[in-house]
Image: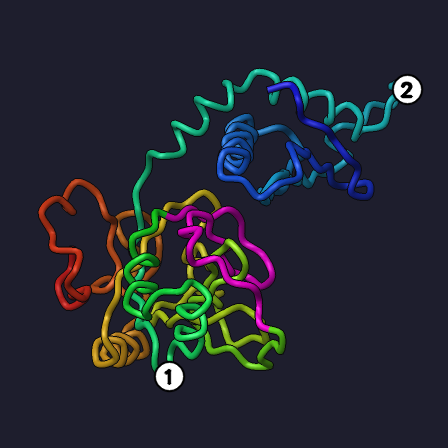
Amino acid sequence: MNDVHIEWLGDRALLLRLGADIDATLNARVHALSHTLREAALPGVVDIVPAYASVAVHYDPRAWSEPAASTAPGERLAQRLLEISAALPAPARMASSAEQGTVLEIPVCYGGEHGPDLADVAGLAGVGADEVIARHVAGDYRVAMLGFAPGFPYLLGLDPALLAPRRANPRTRVPAGSVAIGGAQTGIYPRELPGGWQILGRTPLTLFDAARDPPALLAAGQRVRFRAIDADKFAWLQKSAGARPSRASREGFSAIEPCFFAADESEAGRDKSRPYDAGQPR
């Protein structure tokens, strides 16, 4: 991969730009590069942050300083980053690899008080509310990046029929856990925040908790699916969340274990038309 361009972000960070579009294949390349850079464990690199089409590399210049050198520390690091990126596999192989991995399933109560914009999205799509829900839960999503607020996932994989513009008048308070559409993306509000996305429903899961390790429930590159639950199940799960401490699941994510599981080969034969039975650990 030799089409990476490097930009300076001050004197302690470099931006590796792979493109400028919101595109699943391009984003897969971003995550492949991020993973490779982490595995390289370059000296002085303190953080690697993937976005839609770029990777920010934060570093300590002292680790790349040489008293007799005529080039700046960032220039030497940039050269090493270009060498690593050039050795990555072709984009097609990256896209194929991105299809692998554990799928994390998130319960969502759609419509009603938890999804005030469901009817509007249905009207824009020219279908019924039930069809919007069916299409939304059928998607195979991937966390393209975390941003806007700690733990806020931008998800690619939305059915194009559900594309919806942001609200003309953003809300000043969007409840934590709200699952929403903004353009061609789906997102989940990690805490009560202002926002202008179209809200379809809400999950009882806690997306961000500073006391957890890691604090964010989802990570960039993670595959995600949604599962519809009813209002009673939402209330039960929300109550359980407040009564029980978070525990790390076998995938290394903190969550309410009975309502959050890894979707793998055990999905075979399950009736996906039924509401998610969060009372049974998977």
Q: Which residue occupies 23% across, 79% down?
A: 236
Cα gap from disc 2 to disc 1, whole angstroms: 63 Å
Q: Residue furthest bottom?
A: 113
Q: Position of residue 199 (x, y in %)?
A: 45, 71
Q: State the mark number for residue 124.
A: none
Above or below, 253 relative to 128: above
**Is residue 161 a member of the stretch shown in magenta?**
yes
Residue type, mark 2 in image: Ser
Q: Which residue is mark 1?
A: 113
Number of other residues with Cα within 10 Å of mark 2, as a class: few under 14, some 14 to 19, many 20 or more = few
Indicate the secondary structure of the residue bearing disc 2: loop
Residue nearer the viewer, 150 or 74: 150
- Residue 146: where, in percent of width, then height? 54, 53
Q: Is residue 208 visible?
A: no
> Could you tell me which secondary element the residue under label 1 belongs to?
helix
Residue named by callout 2: 70
Q: Mark 2 near mark 1, Cβ–Cβ under 8 Å?
A: no
Please give left or right for residue 39 compared with residue 66 in the image. Answer: left
| Picture residue at 48% right of the left edge, 67% below the top | 190
- Which is more toward the observer, 24 or 219? 24
- Judged from this view, the residue extending furthest toward the left is 269
Residue at 44% in and 29% down = 95
- Neighbour tally class for label 1: few under 14, some 14-19, many 20 plus, Cα within 10 Å: few
| Vertical placement of residue 197 versus 243, above or below | above
Question: Label 1 amino acid?
Answer: Glu
Q: Which residues are magenta?
A: 141-167
Q: Is residue 204 left or right of residue 273?
A: right
Locate residue 154, reporting x and y percent: 51, 54
Quarter holding the C terminus?
A: bottom left
Q: Is residue 141 visible?
A: yes
Residue found 27% across the figure and 76% down from its top = 234
**The one of 9 and 95 positioned closer to us in this rendering:** 95
